[in-house]
Image: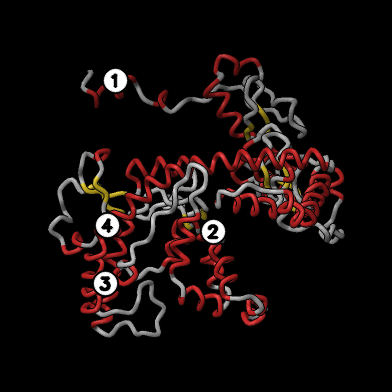
């Protein structure tokens, strides 16, 4: 659909109605709407006061309005209100594990995000922070514009983001490369194409914007504390609403909450601090129930016996109606996985469970391999070939008849040395291989073998130590 087709319905409305609709949007929705077509983007450019109303209208419940973005920063910090809204609500990569997350920033000034409590503790403990105890950047040219924290929790020392420091060095190195002609404007660059003179001018602008950015970040920190509390309250309210609906439709609540459509709708309404209504459910009901039925079919597919799975071949027709992204529940810990990943989870987390019960159709895991190598999948034919090549020696090994508490296996010569070293007192009673092996019994010598230390006298061993 072209941008012209998107703007067609708006052309039938008066400008006042369009402005009223835009003012009712959330900040992130308005930022995404501005990228949908040039017509809507032109309206927002011509009426910048809409952003102030949108940020003010976000005061919901105990959450206050979003702190306004300083107008002066649009020139000095090269940032727009749309980018400001995406920075707060649009999510990004976790600063510790680099996984995508929809959480608001952990540190607004240093632009750090955390996707979990573990990553939050790792970041707060100094994993991505540089505590300048030696005032290294106080008199440094970068120190005039580098963003920093000045908190009592770090002893009052200035705290910088290690990522910002590294990027500052890389940006300066790229500018020097431009000065020497090693980089051209058409090259793919991590930073804008600038020479050192242009970069130093940008540093001056950053120095001018640093006080305003710091003041805005402090205001966002206070706002975020109330926003998180209100978001949890809205989340509980929406969960109670969905529980009531699932009881009405007689479907499993935990299962339907894993449907991608409902996950997305639930996350968006919680993010915007908006309670879900029956009209919202009705609009997405068909897609949600279709995904739920696909999940039910996928769980039935994963409960087949190992015999049926081994009999299945790769050419066996599969259910095309099941989407590849439908998730299934682990019956042992209630976590959700894609069908192709469930058996790998069983291998790593549930060692007492046969992973072949949950393997994809026509595939099997080698149960002889160590756990960390067991995730590889084979067909029935290739599994036999793998066992012959990788574990063929197990067919010619035996267990020690004296080690009743161990299943350790030995080759014939190795068993003779093991008995001589560990079971000398029993070596004269006739040592025979364990009956647990399927190979023919083998006769071994019962004569004790001399150990390595028995070849030397005690005095020779004491001499180097000065004990003679």
Instruction: Assign a secondary structure to mark 3.
Output: helix
Query: In the figure, 370 relative to 58: above or below?
Result: above
Label 2 or label 3, whichever comes before in sequence order: 2
Which circle marks residue 173 in the picture? 3
Label 4 or label 3, whichever comes before in sequence order: 4
Point out the frontmost of discs 4 and 3. Answer: 4
Point out the frontmost of discs 4 and 2. Answer: 2
Instruction: Assign a secondary structure to mark 2.
Output: loop
Instruction: Assign a secondary structure to mark 4.
Output: loop
Q: Nearer the viewer, residue 197 or 58?
A: 58
Point out the frontmost of discs 4 and 1. Answer: 4
Point out the frontmost of discs 3 and 1. Answer: 3
Q: In the rendered image, which residue does mark 1 sit on?
A: 459
Q: In the rendered image, which residue does mark 2 sit on?
A: 26
Looking at the image, which residue is at 24% across and 70% down?
205
Cβ atoms under marks 4 and 2 closer than 8 Å:
no
Q: CA distance from mark 4 to mark 3?
A: 20 Å
Q: CA distance from mark 2 to mark 3?
A: 40 Å
Cβ atoms under marks 4 and 3 closer than 8 Å:
no
């Amino acid at each position: 659909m072209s941008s012209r087709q998107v703007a067609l319905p708006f052309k039938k409305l008066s400008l006042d109605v369009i402005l009223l609709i835009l003012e009712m949007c959330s900040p992130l929705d308005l930022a995404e709407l501005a990228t949908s077509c040039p017509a809507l983007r032109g309206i927002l450019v011509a009426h910048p006061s809409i952003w102030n109303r949108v940020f003010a209208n976000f005061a919901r419940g105990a959450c206050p309005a979003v702190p306004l973005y300083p107008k002066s920063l649009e020139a000095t910090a090269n940032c727009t209100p749309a980018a400001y809204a995406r920075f707060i609500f649009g999510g990004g990569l976790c600063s510790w594990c680099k996984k995508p997350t929809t959480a608001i920033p952990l540190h607004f000034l240093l632009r750090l995000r955390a996707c979990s409590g573990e990553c939050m503790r790792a970041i707060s403990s100094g994993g991505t922070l540089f505590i300048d105890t030696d005032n290294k950047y106080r008199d440094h040219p970068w120190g005039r514009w580098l963003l920093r924290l000045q908190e009592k929790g770090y002893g009052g020392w200035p705290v910088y983001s290690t990522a910002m420091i590294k990027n500052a060095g890389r940006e300066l190195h790229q500018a020097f490369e431009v000065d020497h002609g090693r980089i051209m404007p058409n090259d793919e660059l991590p930073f804008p194409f600038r020479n050192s003179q242009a970069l130093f001018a940008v540093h001056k602008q950053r120095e001018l914007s640093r006080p305003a950015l710091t003041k805005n970040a402090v205001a966002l920190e206070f706002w975020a504390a109330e926003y998180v509390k209100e978001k949890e309250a809205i989340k509980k309210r929406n969960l109670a609403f969905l529980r009531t609906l699932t009881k009405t439709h007689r479907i499993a609540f935990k299962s339907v909450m894993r449907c991608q459509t409902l996950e997305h709708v639930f996350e968006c309404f919680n993010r915007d601090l908006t309670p879900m209504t029956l009209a919202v459910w009705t609009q997405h009901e068909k897609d949600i129930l279709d995904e739920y039925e696909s999940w039910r079919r996928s769980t039935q597919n994963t409960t087949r016996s190992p015999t049926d799975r081994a009999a299945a071949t790769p050419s066996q027709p599969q259910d095309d109606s099941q989407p590849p992204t439908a998730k299934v529940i682990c019956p042992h810990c209630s976590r959700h996985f894609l069908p192709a990943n469930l058996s790998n989870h069983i291998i790593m987390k549930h060692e007492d469970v046969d992973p072949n019960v949950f393997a994809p159709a026509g595939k099997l895991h080698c149960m002889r391999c160590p756990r960390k190598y067991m995730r590889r999948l084979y067909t029935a034919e290739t599994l036999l070939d793998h066992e012959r090549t990788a574990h063929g020696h197990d067919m010619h090994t035996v267990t020690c008849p004296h080690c009743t508490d161990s299943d350790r296996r030995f080759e014939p010569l190795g068993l003779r040395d093991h008995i001589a070293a560990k079971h000398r007192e029993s070596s004269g009673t006739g040592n025979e291989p364990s009956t647990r092996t399927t190979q023919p019994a083998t006769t071994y010598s019962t004569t004790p073998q001399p150990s390595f230390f028995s070849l030397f006298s005690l005095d020779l061993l004491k001499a180097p130590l000065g004990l003679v």
